[in-house]
Image: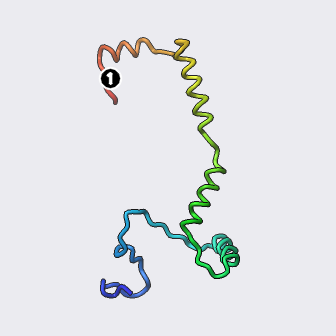
């Protein structure tokens, strides 16, 4: 197929001649992947599998399965706001004075 580029032997990746600005991905049909795809192929009755659609659907399902850290972040922000309003933030006065006089230099 790409012998004009000097390639011989087994089929190689030819994406260099297919320009795109988007990342590419490959899928190996391991036994569990093949089983899932075979089930889908049986239901599609010969229609082409839209792998992009599968990725979008699967990513959405995975996102819903993962814990939502937004609630924890909101709770932490609330605790910090309470500390700030109550002037209850622990401060190392000695270190603050040193930075004030010597300047902040990261090691």
Q: Is 39 placed left or right of 104 in the picture? A: right
User: Residue 85's spot in the image, x, y percent?
Assistant: 53, 14
Q: Which quadrant does the N terminus fall into?
A: bottom left
User: Residue 6's spot in the image, x, y percent?
Assistant: 30, 85
Image height of 59 relative to 106, above or below: below
Q: Which quadrant does the C terminus fall into?
A: top left
Q: Residues within 10 Å of mark 1 (few under 14, many from 20)?
A: few
User: Residue 30's spot in the image, x, y percent?
Assistant: 61, 73
The image's colour scheme reads: rainbow
Q: Quadrant of residue 67?
A: top right
Comparing 70 with 87, the one in front is 70
At 56% from the left edge and 72% from the top edge, which residue is drawn? 28
Image height of 66 relative to 106, above or below: below
Q: Quadrant of residue 33?
A: bottom right
Comparing 38 with 3, the one in front is 38
Q: Quadrant of residue 103?
A: top left
At 35% from the left edge and 15% from the top edge, which residue is drawn? 98
At 69% from the left edge and 78% from the top edge, which residue is drawn? 42
User: Residue 95's spot in the image, x, y percent?
Assistant: 40, 16
Q: Callout 1: helix, strand or loop?
A: loop
**Residue on which disc 1 sits:** 104
> How many numbered dots are placed on residues in this image?
1
């Amino acid at each position: 197929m790409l012998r004009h580029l000097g390639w011989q032997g087994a089929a190689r990746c030819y994406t260099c001649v297919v320009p795109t600005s988007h990342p590419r991905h490959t899928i190996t049909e391991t036994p569990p992947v093949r089983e899932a795809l075979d089930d889908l192929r049986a239901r599609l009755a010969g229609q082409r599998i839209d792998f992009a659609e599968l990725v979008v659907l699967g990513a959405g399902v995975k996102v819903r399965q993962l814990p939502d850290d937004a609630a924890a972040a909101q709770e932490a922000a609330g605790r910090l706001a309470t500390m700030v309003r109550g002037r209850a933030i622990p401060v190392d006065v000695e270190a603050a004075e040193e930075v004030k006089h010597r300047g902040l230099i990261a090691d």
